[in-house]
Amino acid sequence: MPNPFSKGGNWYKGNLHTHTTVSDGQLSPQETIGIYAEGDYDFLALTDHDAVVDYGGLDPHGMTLISGCELAVGRGRLGQTLHVVALGLDTTPWLPESDDFAELVAAISEECELCFAAHPFWSLNEAGDLLDVRGHVGVEVYNATCQNGCARGPSEIVWDILLAHGQRLWGFAVDDAHLREDYCQAWVWVKSAENSVAAILEALKAGHFYASNGPQIYDVVVEAEQVWVHCSPCRQIAVVEATPGGGYTTGRLAAQPPFEEIRLPHHLAARPFRVEVVDDQGHKAWTNPFFPDEVER
Ligand SMILES: [Zn+2]
Ligand SMILES: [Zn+2]
């Protein structure tokens, strides 16, 4: 992916996974839009279970509204479903009668602009169950509702195993809000020429974004053997490589936190890496992976 931090355009903040009274959320679509507009969000997707909300007649309060829904499909080794967030579609997709995640995600991806796997940790979706799945652009690396509900918000391990297997997947942070206490806690910052549905979806597909539930990443410059990171004050900055034991953190530096600017080593010639930062409250931000064959230095 071309590095979004070195790309032209503006940063736009959005949440891509939210529920309303159209399925099992507490607030109406209009009330939900109002909350995100007050939170200074630039775009929002309402993603009710098995239902695409009609935005006609709703006041977007200046935000870009992206159509979407969430589908629970298939049957994993524990009998569990895979939840998939689909964006950019008019109606709920028609799906084949099947238990097979790969067949079902392929069918979903045919009928939307993009889709990603929701909350693997909450669902106990195993990386092994997702190895043959294609057509999605990423996984939720963090889901605020899953964290608030049963402490299963983060899913780095599933993402990293799939990256180590050579998949090219982006990491999404989302609220998945159903209840009043779950709004505006996790989001993506998208680098895009403009804040339109088409431009935001295109940027998401291309991986031109990063995910966060707190810290901001201002800049990432990938040099030949090091990466330079500039972020809001953090207690740890890490290079996480897609290989067993691969990576490096500020915990191996003589310098003490807080860190705002740092250079860390990488082995991009051999394998992809992503950058992760953690602030004093334990909140995180995650870049998308940089791949050996695509990165612009
Ligand atoms: Zn779900
Ligand atoms: Zn959901």
Image: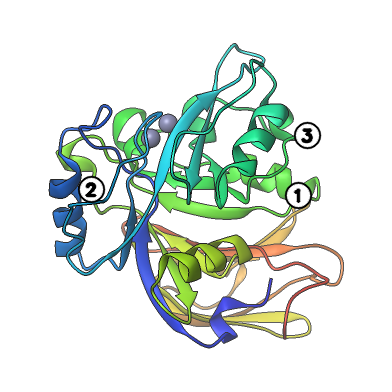
Q: Which residue is mark 1?
A: 167
Q: Which residue is mark 2?
A: 183
**Image region (quadrant) for ligand 2:** top left
Vertically, is 271 above or below 161? below
- In the displayed image of the protein, which residue is found farthest to the top? 79
Crowding near pointer 1: few (<14 within 10 Å), some, many (20+)? some
At label 2, which amino acid type do we have?
Answer: Tyr
Question: SS of the residue at dot 2?
Answer: loop
Vertically, is 170 above or below 175? below
Mark 3 vs 2: CB contact within 8 A:
no
Residue 294 locus on image (x, y percent): 77, 73
The span from disc 1 to disc 3 (Cα, nearest Å) is: 10 Å
Residue 25 locus on image (x, y percent): 23, 32
Residue 122 locus on image (x, y percent): 46, 29
Question: SS of the residue at dot 3?
Answer: loop
> Seen in the image, is 207 located left or right of residue 272?
left
Residue 156 or residue 83, whichever sits in front: 83
Is ligand 1 closer than 8 angstroms to the Cβ of mark 1? no
At label 3, which amino acid type do we have?
Answer: Asp
Q: Earlier in the sequence, mark 3 or mark 2?
A: 3
Q: Is residue 258 visible?
A: no
